[in-house]
Amino acid sequence: MIGRTVSNYRIVDRLGGGGMGVVYKAEDLHLRRFVALKFLPDDVAKDPEALARFLREAQAASALNHPNICTIHAIGEQDGMPFIVMELLDGATLKERIGNRPLETAVLLSLAIEIADALESAHAQGIVHRDIKPANIFVTNRGTAKVLDFGLAKVISSDAETIDGLSDVTTYKTLETTPGTTMGTLGYMSPEQARGEPLDFRSDLFSFGAVLYEMATGRPPFPGATPAIIFDSILNRAPPSLLTLKPGSPTELERIILKALEKKRELRYQSAVELKTDLKQLQGSTLATDRSPIGTGFHRAASRIRVRDVAITTALVAVLVAVWLYYRPRTPNSLSERDTVVLADFANSTDDPVFDETLKQGLNIALHESPFVNVLAESKADAMLRQMTRPANVPLTPELAREVCLRAGSKAYIAGSIARLGTEFVVGLKAVHCQTGDSLAQEQETASTKEEVLGTLGVAAAKLRQKLGESLSTVKAFDVPLAEATTSSLEALRAFSRGRNAYHEKGSAAELPYAQQAIKLDPGFAMAYFALGEDYASLGEVGRASEFLTKAFQLREHTSEREKMAIAGIYYLDVSGELDRAAQTYRDEIDTYTRDGGAHNNLAIVYAEQGRYQDAIDLAQQALHFAPDHLGTYELLGNFFLALHRFDDARETFRQAHDRKMDDYILHNGLYALAFLTADARAMDEQRIWYQSRPEYESYGLSLASDTEAYAGHLRQAQELTRQAVESAMRTDNNENAALWLDNAALREAMFGHTAEARQLAGEALKTMPSRQGVQIEAALALAMAEDTNQAEFLAKSLAEQFPAATQVQSVWLPTIRARTTLTGKNPQAAIDQLKLAMPLQFGQAIFVLNISCLYPSYVRGEAYLAAGQGNNAAAEFKTILDHEGMVWNCPTGALARLGLARSYRLSGDKEKSRSAYQSFLTLWKDADTDIPILQQAKTEYSKLD
């Protein structure tokens, strides 16, 4: 097979094989990427049962899209040989990873949580794997778990209505096997599976418990020389104690494993969610116990240098003299709270490259904790380097740091050094006045070992802060040991530092691999998780962002006080959705760090989600004063101006960002919106060209264009653009955006009267990304508008349980979804009453859409007033939408509000206003597709006005 081309795949290597197939590495000649092709062996290719099982694997796995499940790209057949196209994975199976030795607890828990998350996703779509075992779990070289081989998978049937297999996992349905047969792998079967009984999701959880046991002990829980012995062990015997086989293991881990291995399924874990929760809690407590601060036991150089028979060498004397000359005292001075300092790169004379980047990053973190010392923002330093025609990543020597300092109007620069002194390391810090070149302060500390360098740097930084004028009380209050506030791993900090540099040079996507490497090197590195969460959020992948931000929140006790505030604020804002708690956290952060532009920006976002746009503008303008080179502030401010219909101010804000040579897709979203709202076709075309030139952001432009075409009634063109947007998002592995584009299409199809199409699109969105908040919200609303009340209510119930404290979910989205289903049930007054809860926050910005808000609560309320015969009240709601076009942009609600207004005036008896409103709508849709149901209804209504 090697060298052969199958379809558009060129086979380059054989990777392995088993009873269910042979796997090859192949090159996709169309997309220029490597994939894995799985073929049935020749001796079973003609077996109908084996072939059916092979196809079942493809169908089951292709319905799942999850980072911890092997992705199925396609299925094909060549010369009678069926094959599956899968993602190519680098690494080893969990079976190979375990060998005969137990895994470290931290590694075990990290992998176990990912496997549980994968099972949760599969079970949520009604899929039972039935063959969970170490050989069917892959561990990539990055340390990520991937569940493989759904060849025995089965979709659980349900009498209840479902969306593409979605069902309530707490209501167990069972699947039948052939009488007298067992499916799965002996040794990992559940008791009910071994007996050939009907199965449900809990069977997978037993098998997962067996896998956990093997991960923890290095041996399977039910070994035996014969199948009969193994069967007897599974049905009747408990495995040997984990604590006996591996003394020192957490007792809670043994409890979790034994609960998963309960013989009676009703005593077992009842869902993967429950099991994952316990694993996460154990992980958090284990990290809290294991990560003791480094730095308690440091020794000064004087206490460790011993008199030897041989005199100190000339080289050592030279190092000592150089250190003394470099740090000889000069005129003392101090900073004020308004001064900024520039950080130079460290002078590393140790010949160990790990210190080249890590120490500057560590010093930045240590000083960032101070409410007194203000480090010049990296974006500002980069701007100064651009003025000097220097690349942003050029090493900042003391001479170059001084020039940046002078250009930026900073007070001082801080230079650091590290040198060897025998077996020890001397860490030095020196603050230098930019104007005079005089030393303001200096500090020197010695680390006994390489591992103690970070802690020593933190001690030196704390002492330097006091010498620069900071009060002893704040130094003590904000001085978490540096190794505890970051990581004890220099390699992890090095990866993190490189990621930060990549972010400042090329943006969020460039930082991702470095932050992931940092986490692999230290799974307890909170700020690396935080960086990943912020990167995915800036790329529009809100769901992925939430996963990493949640992890950072769980590990926040291992950070500095400032980072704790930052992590908690983002968690409350973007994950739990508790806007009041987020606002209070950011207010506390601003009170402590008064010049923190980031905290001002984040509080502005909270206010925008609460609909307080003028307050948000005030905060963003303050943030711009502190950090005038931060692109995100311009983007926020521009959008807030749009929301308040201040188009000239928005245009000027975007121009200022452009003049500063700033650019990313969020800025172009705002520019596109401004062009749409001001009917500037040429400017819209310029944005279209920009999106086309950047494949990673192309789907955003296609989605915006799709909404614009739908706004004018060009539905078929909008449908084609949505198809392209979804494909583009998937090409860049952004399935979350693909699902949101499908949801957008479902909403407009429902509003335009195509209910069947709306249901289908909502189902596709949920299949693409079933567990994401935004996807579920928009799908539920689309299904409610398509009058699929059962599914809409099912999703609403799920959202209420998943996000019990989320302000917008509970106060805006759920009332709107429920009101729309109530309206379908012909109870308009009840719908109006339900929507009262949404009124305080109905103008709030939504975080998972391209625009600011489609004002769905107003639209549904308008529909309810029409159904209740209250024309004047209905008109007020539709007019609200038209009066806030700066929030709505090109949402379908903006177009259909014209029709809603016409119907409202007709109901209240004002024919003249009604006629004018109908004409406005029909003019907007003058060349719309003629077969749109709501357009046909509008024309009929208009013709009957006279």
Image (spheres, rainbow, N blue to C red):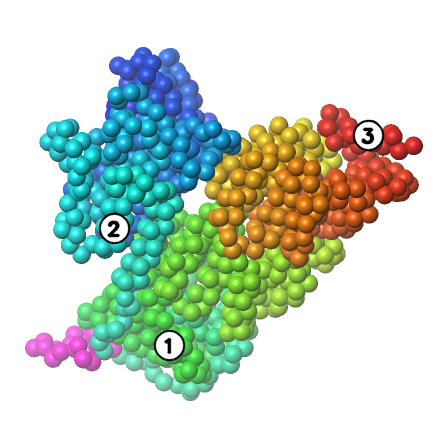
Q: Is residue 104 above or below residue 397?
A: above
Q: Is residue 719 left or right of residue 209?
A: right
Q: Which of pointers 3 and 1 lies earlier in the amino acid sequence?
A: 1
Is mark 3 in CB contact (under 8 Å) with mark 1? no
Q: Which residue is mark 3?
A: 939
Which residue extends farthest left? 309
The numbered mark at residue 488 is none
Q: Residue at x 42, y 37 (%)?
A: 171
The numbered mark at residue 462 is 1
Q: The magenta stretch spans which residues?
A: 301-320
Q: Three-letter amino acid code at disc 1? A: Ala
For the residue carrying disc 2, how many other residues have a C-alpha within 10 Å: few (<14), some (14-19), or many (20+)? few
Could you tell me residue 477's position as x and y percent? Answer: 41, 77
Q: Which of pointers 1 and 2 lies earlier in the amino acid sequence?
A: 2
Q: Is residue 796 left or right of residue 366?
A: right
Q: Three-letter amino acid code at disc 3? A: Lys
For the residue carrying disc 3, how many other residues have a C-alpha within 10 Å: few (<14), some (14-19), or many (20+)? some
For the residue carrying disc 1, how many other residues have a C-alpha within 10 Å: few (<14), some (14-19), or many (20+)? many
Could you tell me residue 521's position as x and y percent? Answer: 31, 53
Q: Is residue 778 magenta?
A: no
The numbered mark at residue 255 is 2
Of residue 868 and residue 853, the one placed in the foreground of this image is 868
Q: Residue at x 20, y 74 (%)?
A: 316
Judging from the image, what secondary structure is the residue with disc 2 in?
A: helix
Q: CA distance from mark 3 to mark 2?
A: 68 Å
Q: Residue at x 42, y 26 (%)?
A: 59
Q: Is residue 318 magenta?
A: yes
Judging from the image, what secondary structure is the residue with disc 1 in?
A: helix
Q: CA distance from mark 1 to mark 2?
A: 43 Å
Of residue 192 and residue 644, the one placed in the foreground of this image is 192
